[in-house]
Image (cartoon, rainbow, N blue to C red):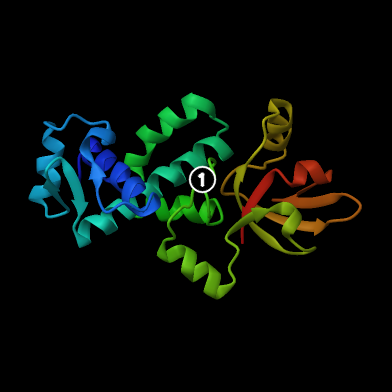
Amino acid sequence: MKLSDKAEEILEAMWIAIEENGKEFADIKEIGIDPEDQSYAELTGLGLIALKERRAYFIKEGKEEGRQTIRRHRLAERLLMDVLDIRGEEGDRRACQFEHLLKEGIDTKVCIMLNHPATCPHGKNIPQGECCSEARNSGNLGVLPLTELKANEEGEIAFIQTKDSNKMHKLMAMGVLPGNRILLLQNFPSYIFRIGYSEFAIDTDMAREIFVRQ
């Protein structure tokens, strides 16, 4: 369902007020969006919410839409803060912008890449998606650090997670790039892996910063 950014922000605020704070409705004054904003009419017109005396109530379909909206927002927070290391007020602001792009299955891909996180960086629950249930039932770990692989196991490099630019350049020079196949040959006393026809050795700390998809 295509909604305006403001409409999605209203659904997020309603989800927090109703589902997380245990209220029956969301006070429009507390949502932070002008009560005269057309986004309210957009949501009522689509049958997602009902308004009564400056109070906003979820209709069944709206509750699920709010759930998906808050899920996308908190996945965006995890991606920006954990992987891209954009934190603080800047991270929060960027997450508000980026969440609107996580649609049409992109949120599922991000969730799998992040290994189905249960909470956002602020400790709030991330509503589960179908991909989370499937991963739990199948035992599929999704994306995991290289240190979790056993000798002679291989996978596809998903991303590198490091704040050290020197480490990043060193790994990239080895061919540790998203999409490349990596075969772990040895995990003790150091990690030895093969990419293409070349073999490299790194320590445990660096191996923890390489995330692969099996």
**In front: 208, or 52?**
52
Question: Residue 47's spot in the image, x, y percent?
Answer: 12, 55
In the displayed structure, would residue 25 be above or below residue 151? above
Residue at image mark 1: 120
- Judge left or right: residue 127 versus residue 188: left
| Residue at the limit of the structure toward the bottom, as seen here | 137
Question: Residue 184's spot in the image, x, y percent?
Answer: 76, 57
Question: Residue 117's spot in the image, x, y percent?
Answer: 54, 53
| Residue at the limit of the structure toward the right, as seen here | 189
**In front: 94, or 145?**
94
Disc 1, SS: loop
Question: Residue 119's spot in the image, x, y percent?
Answer: 52, 50
Task: Classify 10 Å Cα crowding around label 1: few (below 14), some (14-19), many (20 and above).
Answer: some
Q: Residue at x 89, y 55 (%)?
A: 188
Which of the 4 quarters of the picture holds residue 39?
top left
- Judge left or right: residue 149 versus residue 203: left
Amino acid under disc 1: Cys
Residue 30 seen anywhere in this rendered image of the structure: yes
**In front: 13, or 172?**
13
In the displayed structure, would residue 28 be above or below residue 51? above
Which of the 4 quarters of the picture holds residue 164?
top right
Q: Residue at x 84, y 43 (%)?
A: 203
Q: Residue at x 25, y 41 (%)?
A: 10
Residue 103 seen anywhere in this rendered image of the structure: no
- Judge left or right: residue 140 versus residue 101: right
Number of numbered discs visible in the structure rendering: 1
